[in-house]
Amino acid sequence: MKGYKELIEAISKKQYAPIYLLMGEEPYFIDKVSNYIEDNFFEDVGMKDFNFQMLYGMETNVNQIVSYAKEFPMMADYRLVIVREAQSVAKIEQMSEYAKNPQRKTVLVLCYKHKKMDGRTELFKSIAKNGTVFESSKVYENQFPAYIKSMVVEKKRLINDAAINLLANHIGVDLSRINSELDKLENVVPQGSEISIPIIEQYIGISKEYNTFELVSAVIARNQMKTYEILNYFSDSPANFIKTLTIPTLFSAFHKLLQYHFSVDKSESYLRSIGVFWTEVQTYQRAASHYSFGKIVNIMHLIRKYDQMSKGGAGVNTEEQELIKELVFQIFRI
C-alpha cells in the first residue's frame, strides 16, 4: 500500500490505476487524495463536463457505479468517477466482478471512510490486484503536532510549537477541521509568514487564556484558583465552551501522567514522545508529585463515569458544562 504523498506524486505524473480504494479511520487523507485527483485530473477543464461523475454512497448503488465506470471517455484519454462515502453503498461487495476486469479508460475512486474494507473479500482482493489500495490510518495524539506542522508547511506558512499547541487543544484531534481553519488563514497570512497565536485568537476565535487546554493544564497543575476562574469564564461565555472536547482531553492528560509514573525515563524527551507539548513538560513533571499512581487510577475511573453521564448514561440529562464543574470538583477531592 502506498502512502498518500507517494500516491499523489504518482497521480501528478498521470500514472493512474483503473480503480482506487481509499479507506481507513482518518478521513482527512482520503479527502486529500480524492480532492487532488478531482482538481488535477483534467488538463482541459472543458472536458470535465463530459468525463466526470461524482456519486454519493447513500444515493447510488453498485449497478449505477459500474454503469458509469464502463463508459468510455469523450474526446479525452480517461474518464473519472468518484464515489464519496463508498462505505454506505449497499452490497458494495457485488462490485467484485467489475474490479476483476476494470475499464482501463476509467479511473474509479472509492472513498471508503472511517473503517477498512475486509481484506478477505473478493472485492478487496480484486482491487489490490488490479488497482491501488490506500489505507488512511488513525492519527494518534502524539503524532498530531507533526501533522499540523506539515499542513502549515504545505501551505507555505510558518508556525511555532506554542501556536500548534493552542490549535490542537482547542480543536482536538480532527485533521479535517484543522485544515479547514488553516485555509481561513491563507487570506490573512501571506506565504512565508508566521501563523501566530494572536492571529489564531483573532481569526479562529480562541482565547489563549481561557480554553479547554488551559483548563486541563490548570487541573493537572492542581491550580484550583485558575481552574475555577476558567470555569466561571465558560459560564459567562458559553459559546467558547467546546462540548465533547473537555472530558476526552482530561482523560488523555491523566493517561499521559499515568504513563509517566510507569516510565523509568523521566526526561523531557520522553514526555514529548507521549504527546506532552514542550510548554507543559514542567507542569507534568510537577504533577507527578500532586497525583500518585492510585489517585490517577481513581481519577480516570471518575472521568469515565462522567463521560458516560455526558452521553446520557444512567438517565443523566445535565448540561455538559455543569458536569465538567462537578467532575473537576470531584478530582480535587481525591
Image: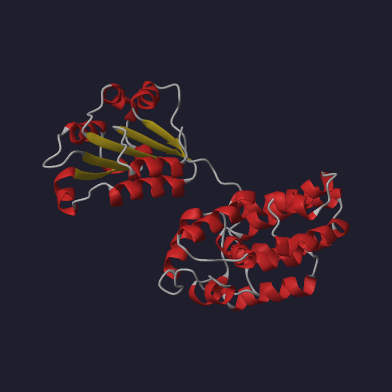
Q: Is residue 54 left or right of residue 214?
A: left
Residue 62 appears in view: yes
Place residue 108 in its image quadrant: top left
Residue 198 position (above or below residue 64): below
> Taking the image as drawn, is residue 311 in sight?
no
Residue 157 spot, x, y in % from top left: 49, 66
In the picture, measured across the screen, residue 40 lies left or right of residue 178, that is: left
Residue at (45%, 61%) from the top-left corner? 155
Of residues 181 and 257, which is closer to you in this image?
A: 181
In this rendering, the answer to whether 24 lies above or below 312 is: above
Query: What colour scheme has been applied to the protein in the rendered image?
Result: secondary structure
Total marks in image: 0
| Up-down relation of residue 207 to residue 324 (above or below) | below
For the point 56% across and 58% down, which residue is it? 149
Q: Give x and y (percent) for residue 193.
A: 50, 71
Image x and y of residue 217, in percent: 72, 64
- Residue 247 image point, x, y percent: 65, 57
**Which quadrant of the figure contains the C terminus?**
bottom right
Identify the residue at image location x=66%, y=62%. Answer: 323
In which quadrant of the rendered view does residue 229 lie? bottom right
Which residue is painted at 74% across and 62% down in the image?
280
Q: Nearer the viewer, residue 192 or 321?
A: 192
